[in-house]
Image: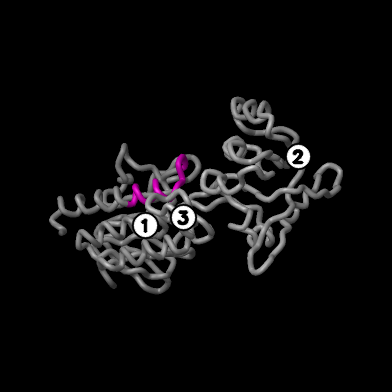
Amino acid sequence: MEHRKIIIIGSGPAGLTAALYAARANLQPLVFEGNQPGGQLTITTEVENYPGFPDGITGPLLMDNMRKQAHRFGAESVYEHVTAVDFASAPFTLTVGEKSYTADAIIISTGASAKLLGLESEQLYMGYGVSACATCDGFFFRDQHVAVVGGGDTAMEEALFLTKFASSVTIVHRRDELRASKIMRERAIRNPKISFKWNSGVQEVVGTEDGGVKRLTHLILKNFVTGETEELQVTGLFIGIGHKPNTDLFKGLLDMDENGYLITQGRSTYTNVEGVFACGDVQDHVYRQAVSAAGSGCMAAIDAERWLAARGIE
């Protein structure tokens, strides 16, 4: 059974930044990168809002650079998925397949996954017109017609943000009324750039590919009342049906809010279990940005380092 001072569960900007800081503190962290090494940014083609890259950088390259930087100082990545954890006593125990690991401290950075429509064509154009983050990608759709799927606050927030850039925004909702809060409903309905397709859903995402470059051209919508289909000419599709934090592994072990996000104490990354810390989107349902996730990863590593030092583990 291999023992480490710090084990980080999950990668992404939060996990790899935590690994960098923990490695520079000579704690030799082990990072289990899970089913999606590098996190959600690995399916983002262009990142233009991460500080330090005036010309932008691709998501996969940014994450690879973060990983290399953490490895330079002694962090180690394992591209496997943690299947069970035991926080009942110290050192903590993690199960990975048939192997077990122990750690004096744990940092959780398993992130949150955007809820998607489940269409094969949606995956085909993810990052090429399809997005689950208007704040991240809205700038690329200046003066274009885009669509947002959803009827809750998330969808309204996405649509309203997109009106800063897009020429028009169509909200596609499967019902005939919005379930968003009253103030968000009113803002969306009053906005002259926003229109609605009621009782409808996206049946297919359609685009072209020229020289290896994919581009979304339109959606095929189905009306659930009439059964009819129609084409909606858009160059962007934003999925606004919410996120699911990747916390199933910790149910019954760590405190969570009603949506499953891990609860951290005050302005720290401490969870309710001493020695277990959480950072990034797994505990942040408000900002969900790479830079804020990286910042909380730094916080988690510093919190963990100080917690270990107070117990004589340097």
The amino acid type found where label 1 is placed reads Gly
Residue 210 in sight in this render: yes
Q: Quadrant of the C terminus?
A: bottom left
Cα separation, mark 3 vs mark 1, equals 22 Å
Q: Residue at x 61, y 26 (%)?
A: 182
The spot of residue 171 in percent (x, y) is: 69, 40
- Image quadrant of residue 92? bottom left
Q: Residue at x 40, y 69 (%)?
A: 96
The spot of residue 167 in percent (x, y) is: 67, 39
In this rendered view, identify the residue nearer to me: 216 or 242: 216
The amino acid type found where label 3 is placed reads Gly
Secondary structure at numbered mark 2: strand
The amino acid type found where label 2 is placed reads Lys
Task: State left or right for residue 258 relative to residue 216.
Answer: left
Residue segment shown in magenta: 285-297
Instruction: Characterize the magenta stretch by its predominant secondary structure.
Output: helix
Mark 3 or 2, nearer chain start: 3
Cα separation, mark 3 vs mark 2, equals 34 Å
144 up-or-down from 53: above or below: above
Residue 153 in sight in this render: no
Secondary structure at numbered mark 3: loop
Q: Which residue is mark 1?
A: 15
Q: Which residue is mark 3?
A: 56
Q: Quadrant of the N terminus?
A: bottom left
Q: Which residue is mark 2?
A: 197
